[in-house]
Structures are given as C-alpha cells and as structure tokens.
Image: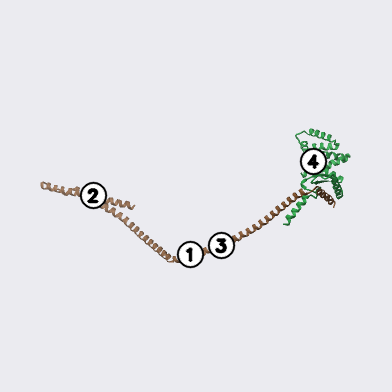
C-alpha cells in the first residue's frame, strides 16, 4: 500500500509538471476530478482497464472513449495511455488522491468533512467554511455528510484534525469519566 | 563301583555254595562207588581212591582259593573306603552338630535379647511416627495457609473485577439511557442551538 502510494505520488507529480508545461493545469485538474467521480461511481472500472486479459490497444481505445466523453485535455489522455502502457492503471486511485493533495497544497487549499446528525443548511456550512478558512489561512473545500447516530451537534475533520461537537461524543465522555472515577 | 563289587562277591559266594553242593553228591557217589568197589573187592580185586573224586576235591579247593583271594582283594579295597566314608560322615555330623549348637546358642541369645530389641524398635517406630506426624501437620498447615492466601487474593481480584464490570455496565446503561432521553427530548431548536454553539466555538 505504501509502495502504491509512493507510485501514485510520483505519477501525480509528473502529471502536474506536464500540465504546467502545457499551461493546462486547470483543465487537467478538472479532468481528474471527473475521473475521480467516475471511479467512485464504478470502482470496477480500474480493475477492468488494468486486466491484462484484454489487449492493451482495446483498453486504450476504451480509455480514449471515456476521455472523449469527459472532454479531457490532451495531457490527461496521454497520461492515461501511459498508465496502460506501463501496466500501472491499478495505481490510478492513488494517483488521483496524490494529485488532489498536491494540487490542494499548490493552490493553498484544504479539504474538510463536516458531519451532522441532520443535513446542515448551506448558510451554516458557509459559516463553518469561513471560520475554518480564517483558522487555517487556506481555502477550504467542504464535503457534507449526515450521521443520525451523532444525535446532535457537528463533527469537522481537516486532515488528521477533528473538531468534535457531537452529542454522542459528549455522552461517551461522561461514560469514560464515570468509569475512571471508580 | 562298590555296589558292583558287592554284587560280584555275592555271585562268587553263591557260586562257591553251588559248587559245594555239587561236590556233596560227588562225595556220596564216590562213597557208593567205594562201597561198590568194596563189593567188587569182596568179589574180586580191591582198587585205589577214585580219581574223579580227587579231581572234584582239587577243583573245589582251587575254586575256594580263587574265591578267598578275590574276596580278600575286594575286602582290602572296600573296607578302608567304607571306613573313610564313615569317618567323614562322623566328622560332618560333628560339624553339623557344632553348627546347630552355635545356631541354637545364637537363637537363645536372641530370644534373651528379644524383649530389649522389641522395646528399642517400638521406641524407634514411635519416634519415626511422631516425626512423620509433625512433618505432615507442618506441611498441611503451610498448604492451608497458602490456600487461604490464594483464596483471599482470588476473592479480592473477583471483587475488583465484579466492581469494574458493574461500573462498566452501569456506565453503559447510563449512556444508553442518556442517548434515549436525548433522542426523545432533543428538539429542532436544541439541534440548531447546538450547531450555533459549535460554529461559535470553532474559531475559538
């Protein structure tokens, strides 16, 4: 897993360099977001395009069709063809994650996950974003989630940092204190 | 070997007796013959002793001599051996008697000392039994102390574990109950207030 992650970072750095050289960083960024969404929807896609049972030209043709539908930039198409040629298409999810991380770092962005018992109103989410941006000094991209088991409150995670204000966590803290007191 | 010699001697004796018996009719015959000769002499000429008679006598004398000679040879070999055997038997019997007397003396002494030995053995057995009893009692007491200590430790651990389990169970029940109460009583306004408070504290 660590090796795959390393491979993903190396390919991601190469892609960012190629995109920058082509002056198409924004386009490639958009293409990879589209690819990430596609892989998330159809996880078997990566396995199929990595399967050596299918000849490489056929897999490349399928990839070209997908890129065409996404309206991908030439740099993106070349990169996907390279993954097939190098028999590294299974590293695509790692490449996407590394690209996202590197791209965010380059653009001064962080990603946050905001979870509440019920879906939060947009105004509240925007308020949380604004406060997080002031707190981190970076642009914050928020992903919303709902978890009724939290009972109430909000939990925000940025990287490895968690701001936990859920009712469930508060109750569990009380339980821990009860156990420690004995 | 001695038995064979005895048998031979018996045979020789029987043979000599048989010959003697056979010589007697010969003598009678010779007498008859002599009477006949007298008769004949009375009738005519008188003849000398009968040669057959003398031959039988001589024959008998030779046989007797052989028998005597044989028997003397047998007796010369047999009697000293028998004497030696008897002397040996007497010596052995004497030795056996001496040994028996010595053993008898030993047993007599033992019997005389038996009471004392029995008394000493009884005392030794008593001492050994008391030592064993003391050792067993000490071991049993040590084992009992150890069992008691272990039981106390186990009981203490059980109490601690039971308390811990009870506390955990109580805490879990409290959490379950609290979650149930919160779920039932938390209103939309409460939820909004919680979110507002969270947002307000987020920057702090």
Residue B146: x %, y % from top left: 61, 60
Q: Disc 4 versus disc 2: distance between alpha carbons?
A: 146 Å
Q: To which residue does mark 3 refer?
A: B137
User: In the rendered image, which residue does mark 4 sit on?
Assistant: A93
Label 3–label 4 contact, CB within 8 A: no
User: In the drawing, does residue A107 fall left or right of residue B20?
Assistant: right
Residue A103: horizontal and vertical position, in percent? 85, 43
The chain holding disc 1 is B
Judged from the image, the secondary structure of the residue bearing numbered disc 2 is helix
Residue at (64, 57) in percent of width and height: B155
Chain letter of the residue carrying label 3: B
Q: Which chain is green?
A: A
Q: Is residue B63 left or right of residue A15?
A: left
Viewer-side residue, B86 vs B145: B145
Q: Secondary structure at mark 4?
A: helix
Nearer to us of marks 1 and 2 is 1
* Residues flagged by tags 4 and 1 on a common chain: no
Q: Nearer the viewer, residue A61 or B88?
A: A61
Outermost residue to the left:
B43
How far apart are the two marked residues, 3 and 4, measured between alpha carbons? 78 Å
Q: Mark yes or no: residue A109 visible.
A: no
Q: Nearer the viewer, mark 4 or mark 2?
A: 4
Residue B97 picture quarter? bottom left
Check residue B122 in the rendering and tell me which mark sits there, or answer none.
1
């Amino acid at each position: 897993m660590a090796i795959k992650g390393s491979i993903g970072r190396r390919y991601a750095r190469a892609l960012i360099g190629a995109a920058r050289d082509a002056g198409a960083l924004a386009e490639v960024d958009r293409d990879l977001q589209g690819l990430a969404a596609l892989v998330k929807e159809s996880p078997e896609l990566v396995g199929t395009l990595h399967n050596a049972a299918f000849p490489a030209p056929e897999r490349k043709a399928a990839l070209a069709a997908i890129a065409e539908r996404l309206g991908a930039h030439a740099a993106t198409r070349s990169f996907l063809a390279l993954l097939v040629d190098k028999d590294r298409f299974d590293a695509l999810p790692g490449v996407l994650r590394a690209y996202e991380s590197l791209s965010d770092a380059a653009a001064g962005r962080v990603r946050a996950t905001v979870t509440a018992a019920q879906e939060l109103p947009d105004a509240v989410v925007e308020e949380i974003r604004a406060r997080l941006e002031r707190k981190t000094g970076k642009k914050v991209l928020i992903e919303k989630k709902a978890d009724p088991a939290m009972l109430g409150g909000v939990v925000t995670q940025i990287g490895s940092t968690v701001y936990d204000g859920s009712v469930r966590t508060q109750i569990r803290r009380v339980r821990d204190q009860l156990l420690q007191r004995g | 070997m001695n038995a064979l010699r005895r048998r031979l001697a018996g045979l020789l004796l029987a043979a000599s007796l048989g010959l003697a018996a056979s010589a007697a009719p010969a003598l009678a015959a010779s007498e008859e013959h002599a009477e006949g000769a007298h008769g004949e002499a009375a009738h005519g000429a008188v003849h000398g002793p009968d040669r057959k008679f003398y031959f039988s006598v001589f024959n008998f004398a030779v046989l007797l001599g052989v028998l005597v000679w044989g028997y003397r040879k047998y007796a010369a070999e047999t009697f000293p051996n028998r004497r030696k055997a008897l002397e040996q038997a007497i010596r052995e019997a004497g030795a056996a008697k001496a040994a028996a007397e010595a053993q008898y003396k030993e047993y007599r002494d033992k019997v005389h000392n038996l009471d004392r030995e029995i008394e000493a053995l009884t005392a030794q057995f008593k001492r050994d039994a008391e030592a064993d009893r003391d050792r067993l009692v000490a071991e049993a007491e040590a084992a009992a102390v150890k069992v008691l200590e272990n039981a106390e430790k186990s009981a203490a651990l059980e109490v601690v574990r039971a308390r811990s389990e009870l506390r955990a169970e109580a805490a879990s029940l409290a959490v379950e109950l609290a979650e149930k109460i919160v779920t039932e009583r938390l209103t939309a306004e409460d939820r909004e207030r919680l979110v507002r408070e969270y947002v307000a504290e987020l920057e702090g």
